[in-house]
Amino acid sequence: MSKDYYSILGVSKSASGDEIKTAFRKKAHEHHPDKGGDESKFKEVNEAYQVLSNADKRRQYDQFGSDFQNGQAGGAYGGFSGFNGANINMEDLSDLFGGFGDMFGFGGPGGGRRRGPERGRDLEMSLSIEFLESIHGLETEIKFPHLKTCKTCHGSGHAPDAKIETCNTCRGTGRVSRLQRTILGSVQTQAMCPDCQGEGKKASASCKECHGQGRTKQDEKLKVKIPAGINHGESIRLSGYGDAGEKGASAGDLYLKVRVSPHPDMKREGDDIYSQAEISMSQAALGTTIEVTTAYGQVKLKIPSGTQPQTVFRLKEKGAPRIHGRGQGDHFVKVKVVIPKSLNKKQREALESLGL
């Protein structure tokens, strides 16, 4: 009996190649046995895809139906037929099931290839600085431990006088083959050689300094320039100061996360700084000049007569420097008018005479 492959994938007869592939991936994910699906439906979905994804097979199917294959859809048309006749296209499934193709030594990027030396890990450390240091910047010295390339073997992991020979386990290929039983049958798999770690060669003796690791943990001292205007929680990237890579691969980076201690009188928001100043009732009414503490020292601020409580004054360009732009922020001063909690007789009479 002819099978309706379009119905199996849930697409129309006019579906494009991309639509067919998308539908296949969805159905394969739904019915995959490893995910609790139905194995027979999984094979049926794959069979439908093998036909409809191939222009020639699809044209023959549209003309003659599934009988055009004489019952050979499961293995007569190339591809991988190791799953008891289920012609699985590993390239289409490799990224769907999290490295599925690599498990079998083919399919995805790098399948069947040697794994190269890995780049070193990125590291992160915190640096606490004062509020005013964050505004003006500073140069400081930090000390931190990290993996550095071994000075004795220069990262190779081999003893300086060691003899380099072809790995007997993988015979220089860097990979070994195994016969693995799966829910869909027996499959020959490939994996990185455990003896040479994919290099295809081995040394007769390991470096005594790093015990064959090619890296040793060492303390590092480094002078670091903290830019003016850096804010709390921002990070500075120090390229190449993370852990050293494997076998001479590039080192990772160090991310220096800055923590700024709060100031007792000033608060920062973005590139602007905010503070508060107290004045008396008479100063607010008559006007005065006061001194305000800023990140750049004392600054005189003129208070005009008739100033109301909570009035905010702007001190232009007295805020934090802009790291990612020109200029700097402003300093805003909010005025708090202090009202006496108690008055003596003379003060009370004076106020009453003014009628305020």
Image (spheres, rainbow, N blue to C red):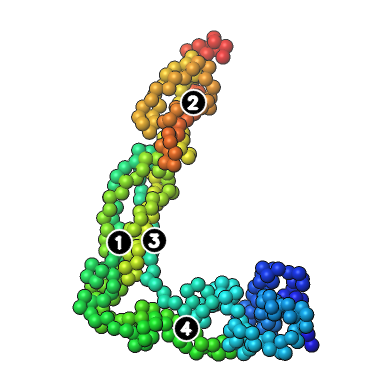
Q: Which residue is mark 3?
A: 122
State the quadrant of the C terminus. Answer: top right
In which quadrant of the rendered view does residue 101 lie?
bottom right
- The kind of secondary structure element at disc 1 is strand
Q: Secondary structure at mark 3?
A: loop
Query: How far apart are the alpha carbons under marks 3 and 2?
Result: 45 Å
Between circles 2 and 1, the one closer to the viewer is 1
* SS class, disc 4: strand
Q: Position of residue 148 (x, y in %)?
A: 29, 64
* Residue indicated by mark 4: 190
Question: Callout 2: few (<14), some (14-19), or many (20+) C-alpha neighbours within 10 Å?
Answer: some
Q: Amino acid at mark 3?
A: Asp
Label 1 vs label 4: CA separation?
37 Å
Task: Check contact, mark 1 vs mark 4: CB within 8 A.
Answer: no
Residue 116 image offset from top left, x and y in percent: 39, 72
- Is residue 8 visible to the viewer in this orientation of the structure? no
In this view, 286 is above or below 313: above
Between circles 3 and 4, the one closer to the viewer is: 4
Q: Which residue is mark 2?
A: 313
Q: Nearer the viewer, mark 3 or mark 2?
A: 3
Q: Residue at x 36, y 86 (%)?
A: 171
Residue 43, above or below 299: below
Tag 4: amino acid? Gln
Q: CB of mark 4 within 8 Å of CB of mark 2?
A: no
Q: Quadrant of residue 47?
A: bottom right
Q: CA distance from mark 4 to mark 2?
A: 72 Å
- State the mark number for residue 270: none
